Image (tube, rainbow, N blue to C red):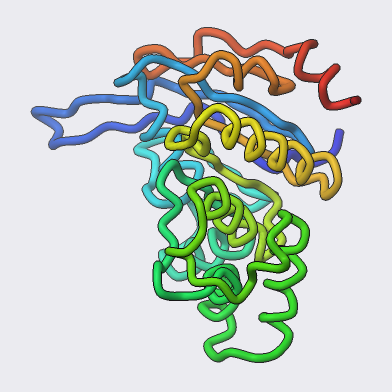
Amino acid sequence: MAEPVLLLDGIRKAYGSAETEFEVLHGIDLRLERGEFAALIGPSGSGKSTLLNLIGLLDRPSRGLLVIDGEDTAALDDTALTRLRGERIGFVFQHHHLIPAFTAEENVAMPLLIARGRPDAAMFARAGELLARVGLGERRHHAANRLSGGQQQRVAIARALAMSPSLVLADEPTGNLDTHSADEVFALLREVNVQLGTSFLIVTHDPRLAGRCDRIIELVDGAIVSDRPNRAGADLRGE
């Protein structure tokens, strides 16, 4: 069997001291294969954000195994975790977190600039290619604050792909958009998944969007209560 892009085994996360410890995640087991397009659902307070922070290497689990692209993260120091996060994981948030005065191209190039330490022509060429892929090639030199909400989220998706990550974590990526823009952004995520083989884990409260994913993982009270393939989403993938 091929190595998964993400493997969680017995992941637990607790906060507080030994006397007042409060456990948020209770032994999470999860395997995400390369090219999967999965939804993570659950009520508020279920632990979705905590789990996403662990997978995104923004926090460390209290116990358990967390492997990204074959690397056991427990063996990595903070510098190595930052490197792994920057190279292998892309992030798309509900709030796009663009730099308003920067152009679309400059925003997309930012992860490359951080990784390389100085700007060069190749990183801006890469940014332009990604903006063309998300349908914004003609707006590459527009300031982010001159773009619509849906266009800004497209820039955020292009930025998430700048380092050619194996895994993209999308936290309510359509939460601030109207229905039409949300459908366009979601369709773009699916297009990237199919064409580039990038794995996606999408947190959403929208059952309509979750129903368009290949797999639906449900988290309740810090535990996975359901993990099922979604034939309807798989059928849409083949369209």
Rendered location of residue 149, percent (x, y): 48, 48
Instruction: Name the residue at the left extreme.
Output: 19
Q: Residue at x 71, y 61 (%)?
A: 164
- Which residue in the rendered view is the most extreme toward the right? 238
Q: In the image, is 229 to the left or to the right of 147?
A: right
Q: Residue 108: x and y, percent? A: 59, 68
Q: Position of residue 192 (x, y in %)?
A: 76, 46
Q: Give the number of callouts.
A: 0
- The part of the image, by quadrant, that contains residue 227 is top right
Q: Nearer the viewer, residue 21 or 59?
A: 59
Residue at 83% x, 26% y: name it: 237
Does 87 appear above or below 219?
Answer: below
The answer to which of 19 and 95 lies nearer the viewer is: 95
Q: Which x, y percent locates residue 53? A: 41, 43
Closer-to-camera residue (188/118): 188
Determine whether 66 is above or below 218 in the image.
Answer: below
Residue at image position (45%, 52%) is 96
The quadrant of the image that shows the C terminus is top right
Left or right, 72 with respect to 32, comes to left
Q: Is residue 231 above or below residue 131?
A: above
Give whichever of 111, 63 is nearer the camera.
111
Residue drawn where x is 77% and y is 41% of the image: 193
* Quadrant in which the N terminus appears: top right
